[in-house]
Image: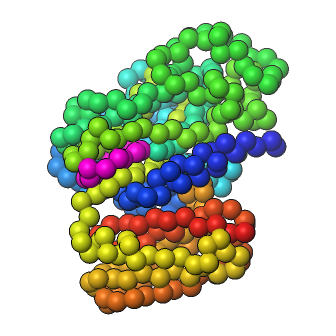
Amino acid sequence: MRKFYTLLFSLFAAFALNAQNDTLIHMTFDDDDTLDIQVGAPSGNDDPFWINLDQDGIGDGNGRPQEWFLSLGYADADSSNIVLASSSWLVGFAPGNRNYFISPQLHLGSGPAELTWASASRQTPLYLDGYAVVVSTTDNLESSFTDTLFRAAQYLSGASGGGPVSPVPSFNDYDFSAGWVHGFDGNSIQLDDAADSTRFIGELVQHSADLSAYSDQSIHIAFIHNSDDDNLISIDNILVTGTNAASIEEDALKGSIQMFPNPTTDVLNVSFELPVSSEVNVSITDITGRTLYTQSYGDMTPGEHTFTQSVQDYAAGSYFITIEALGTTFTNSFVVQ
């Protein structure tokens, strides 16, 4: 099977660009972060977890969950990758699909901030699913998401007859709603898995949105699947970087973090200094967001600390290490040669 890995390079570029910023939130759906998701309605208050809401209440036409759900592999050439998926193929082909995935409250500092994520439609161009990324500056109720950051188009009408798979479908034969069209650039289509010339399977493509307009504010971000009678959409690797109102202790810890050697071939040494006692957790992810290593060190005393991690079994490339301490996270990149 031919595979296209445009996501790998775009993710690396995004992480490199934002390496100087704090990681405010990061969801990969491949690890324990899925425990931070609660199915049901938002409270309108500062819910400390992601809210997964099926607002329309209409049953799925294929027996799939009515809300967003974890799915393995369909949206990418990598069949081991877990994504968050949502279905618009409802009972009786009913319109009105509305599934919300709502973030906890994010406190943005005065510096630049950015949201990055990846998405893929199960089919394109026929029955292409769309969605919207929106912001609320007040609370996490559905009606409060009044600012639109990004809109992906959905299929409206057009050619329905299949035919032999060709390198590029004719998107001009279809009508879509306003927004970015999955697959239209020719770089987000997995050709070998197309059922016919109308139904290519989309691969994950990265997107970004500038959050600088919300400096010094507290916001919620929501992904709304609002396609009518299409098929499936997926999202993955949601990352918000920016600056938060760091305390003197957080600044001191961030300034003390060192990694050596970098690049490395066999081991990575990480040192840092805690100004006060704190619980410390460490994780390493690859460029796709897959977690390779995680360790909880429990409560650590003030002072200098160093740990060594073997990376000799890691493939050559770029990786990211995240240290959770003092109530925040610090992410840096390193290279294995």
Residue 169 visible to the viewer = yes
Q: Is residue 200 above or below residue 45?
A: above
Front residue of 46 and 214? 214
Residue 103 magenta: yes
Q: Residue at x 55, y 64 (%)?
A: 333
Residue 291 visible to the viewer = no
**Magenta segment, which residues?**
101-115
Q: In the rendered view of the protein, which quadrant contains the N terminus?
A: top right
Q: Residue at x 20, y 52 (%)?
A: 46
Q: In this view, does 132 lie above or below 327?
A: above
Residue 16 magenta: no
Residue 174 in the image: state x and y as whole percent: 61, 12
Q: In which quarter of the image is residue 182?
A: top right
> For this view, does 215 lie left or right of residue 286?
left
> For this view, does 146 lie left or right of residue 200?
left
Front residue of 251 and 168? 251
